[in-house]
């Protein structure tokens, strides 16, 4: 046996199976569908709900073709979605939590949304301003 070979014991396998059983009721992806006209990715979940995601918000899918998106594989009994032609893998629990990419990607999405100029945003800012807006910053005394 080579020095770098690792043997997994029966006890380690049993412990891993027990940990996995704790997540048996977690929602998992069953079907992934792309609606090209709306540029949406719809993920049907095992809890009878659906995730509806704008393609441009999902890291790695923004410039993908319909055929590339429809060529997906479910991984880990539906805990992951892989798009082999695009070299993109998505983690379903993260998608459910609203995480559509890595930190840098999510920061870019936040910046894009924060800089949006819409009538709804203008009205929300006006309403918030009528309530007094943000509290004024106070200078802290330095020791």
Image (tube, rainbow, N blue to C red):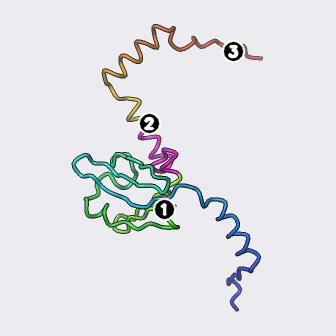
- Tell me what residue is drawn at x 34 percent, y 68 percent: 85
Judged left or right of residue 39, residue 89 is right
Residue 31 horizontal/vertical position (percent) = 39, 60
The CA span between labels 2 and 3 is: 29 Å
Residue picked out by circle 1: 80
Foreground residue, 84 or 27?
A: 27
Left or right of residue 23: residue 128:
left
- In front: mark 2 or mark 3? 2
Q: Which residue is mark 2?
A: 110
Quarter holding residue 115: top left
| Nearest to the observer: residue 102 or residue 49 | 49
Q: Which quadrant is the N terminus positioned in?
A: bottom right
| Sequence-earlier tag: 2 or 1 | 1
Q: Is residue 101 magenta?
A: yes
Q: Position of residue 121 (x, y in %)?
A: 37, 22
Which residues lie in the magenta part?
94-109
> Label 3 belongs to which residue?
140
In the picture as drawn, the residue positioned furthest to the left comes out as 37
Alpha-carbon distance for marks 2 and 1? Answer: 24 Å
Secondary structure, mark 2, is: helix
Which mark sits nearer the N-terminus, 1 or 3? Answer: 1
Report how far apart the C-alphas of labels 1 and 3 lie in the structure.
48 Å
120 in relation to 38, above or below: above
């Amino acid at each position: 046996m080579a020095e770098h070979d690792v043997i997994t014991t029966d006890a380690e396998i049993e412990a891993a199976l027990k940990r996995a059983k704790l997540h048996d009721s977690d929602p998992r992806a069953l079907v992934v569908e792309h609606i090209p006209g709306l540029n949406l990715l719809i993920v049907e979940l095992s809890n009878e709900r659906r995730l509806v995601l704008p393609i441009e918000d999902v890291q790695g899918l923004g410039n993908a073709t319909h055929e590339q998106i429809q060529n997906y594989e479910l991984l880990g009994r539906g805990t992951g979605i892989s798009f082999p032609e695009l070299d993109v893998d998505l983690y379903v629990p993260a998608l459910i939590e609203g995480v559509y990419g890595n930190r840098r990607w999510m920061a870019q999405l936040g910046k894009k949304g924060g800089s949006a100029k819409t009538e709804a945003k203008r009205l929300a800012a006006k309403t918030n301003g009528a309530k007094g807006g943000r509290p004024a910053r106070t200078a802290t005394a330095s020791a």
